[in-house]
Amino acid sequence: MAKTYYAVSSEYMITQIAGIGKMLVLQTDEERSAQLQLTSNNTLTTSLKITQLAQERHALYLQETHNRQAEYTTYINDLLAIELEGNIG
């Protein structure tokens, strides 16, 4: 989760925050309106990218969890087989 937060902050949020300073120097309502529209469009695009990143990371997490569970199952089955062999022999 921390890695995802860092990736999102580094790649997307820093540039958005840096772009806010442009609003301070705009002279007309038209410039401000255009900048707000651009910021809105960028925010929507960024939101979609972040959603996709979160979904990819979640899918990876689920796959890793499934793999780990399979490893545990194999390990437990191996232990049981060893124990059964010891009891039989």
Image (cartoon, grey):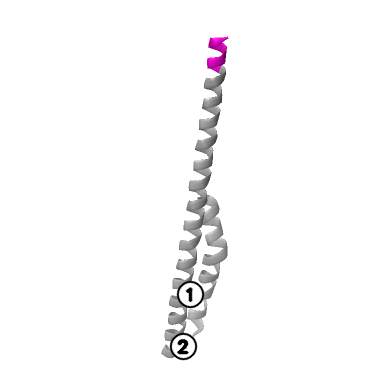
Helix, strand or loop at disc 1? helix
Give the class, few, some or many, for how many residues have Cα within 10 Å of label 1's Cα (few <14, many ≥20): some
Helix, strand or loop at disc 2? helix
Mark nearest the camera among 2 and 1 is 1
Q: Could you tell me residue 43's position as x and y percent? A: 45, 72
Q: Nearer the viewer, residue 85 or 28?
A: 85
What separation in Å lies between label 2 and label 1 (alpha carbons)? 16 Å
- Quarter holding the C terminus? top right
The residue located at (49%, 74%) in the rendering is: 20
The residue located at (42%, 85%) in the rendering is: 33
Amino acid found under the numbered disc labelled 1: Asn
Q: Which residues are magenta?
A: 83-89
Mark 2 or mark 1, earlier in chain = 2
Q: Nearer the viewer, residue 78 or 27?
A: 78
Give the class, few, some or many, for how many residues have Cα within 10 Å of label 2's Cα (few <14, many ≥20): few
Asked if residue 15 is among those painted magenta in the image, a careful observer would answer no
The residue located at (52%, 75%) in the rendering is: 19
Q: Could you tell me residue 76's position as x and y percent? A: 52, 26
Q: Is the stretch drawn in magenta largely helix, strand or loop?
A: helix
Query: Residue extending furthest front?
Result: 88
The residue located at (55%, 22%) in the rendering is: 79
Q: Could you tell me residue 61's position as x and y percent? A: 50, 48
Q: Could you tell me residue 15's position as x and y percent? A: 55, 70
Q: Nearer the viewer, residue 46 or 29?
A: 46
Asked if residue 88 is among those painted magenta in the image, a careful observer would answer yes
Amino acid found under the numbered disc labelled 2: Glu
Q: Which residue is mark 2?
A: 31
Q: Are marks 2 and 1 in contact (CB under 8 Å)?
A: no
Q: Which label is found at residue 42?
A: 1
